Amino acid sequence: MKTLTVSVVTPDGPVLEDDYEMVSCKAESGELGILPGHIPLVAPLSINAVRLKRENHVDKLAVNGGFMEVRPDKVTILAQSAEKPSDIDIDRAQRAKERAERRLQSKQDDIDTLRAELALRRAINRLSVSS
Ligand code: ATP
């Protein structure tokens, strides 16, 4: 089976570098499935899971924003944050989710609303990837 090298980097440092058969992620334009030999592409990523498939196994990452650069033999993801399921602190994500929900219910001005919505999406994404 052909593979491509996947490299995931955040401001805190490298998160993962390994070879996979397929990368699935959610770009702002929709779902993307990247196989080896894909045409070069740069796409902004949304707050979502990235799924990395090899043989019969899928590794998941909770990715928060950033960009993906695709070349035929390599996928590079540069994200604000990216965590493996084992690195996700579930209690922390649960607290972040509840805090964001409380802020959204208190209905402050628009900027706070957007910020709380993004925090809520990050927390839900982490909880979903860790489960
Ligand atoms: P919190 O309010 O709990 O800080 P956040 O969504 O605001 O959550 P981010 O700004 O997205 O946090 O991330 C800051 C740093 O903390 C990043 O390095 C990220 O990987 C890490 N991080 C955030 N939440 C968690 C979590 N639940 N488990 C593990 N690492 C986390």
Image (tube, rainbow, N blue to C red):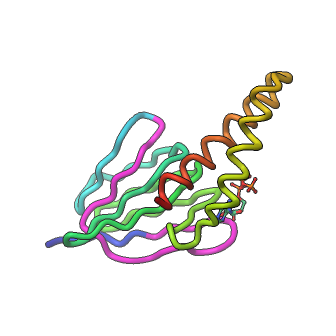
Image point (57%, 62%), residue name: 82
Q: Quadrant of ligand 1?
A: bottom right
Question: Is the stretch drawn in magenta largely helix, strand or loop?
Answer: strand
Q: Quadrant of the N terminus?
A: bottom left
Whether 11 is among the magenta residues is yes
Residue 104, quarter of picture: top right
Q: Residue at x 80, y 33 (%)?
A: 103
Q: Looking at the picture, tell me which residue is in the foreground, 112 or 75.
A: 112
Inspect the magenta stretch and tell me whether residue 16 lies in it. yes
Residue at horizontal 61%, vertical 61%? 90
Q: What residue do we see at 85% from left, 24% from top? A: 108
90 is higher (above) or lower (below) than 43: below
Q: Residue 36's x, y, as percent?
A: 24, 63
Image quadrant in which you'd find residue 11: bottom right
Q: Is residue 28 left or right of residue 95?
A: left
As displayed, is residue 100 above or below residue 128? above
The correct choice, above or below, for 15 with respect to 92 in the image is below
Q: Position of residue 111 (x, y in %)?
A: 81, 28
Say if 57 sits above or below 97 in the image: below
The residue lying toward the viewer, choosing from 1 and 121, is 121
Q: In the figure, is residue 12 to the left or right of 50?
A: right
* Residue found farthest to the left: 1
Range of residues picked out in magenta? 7-28
Q: With 97 as the anchor, is 60 left or right in this view?
A: left
| Residue 67 position within the rendered picture, expressed as x and y whole percent measured from the top left | 53, 51
Question: Which residue occupies the extreme right position in the image?
Answer: 108
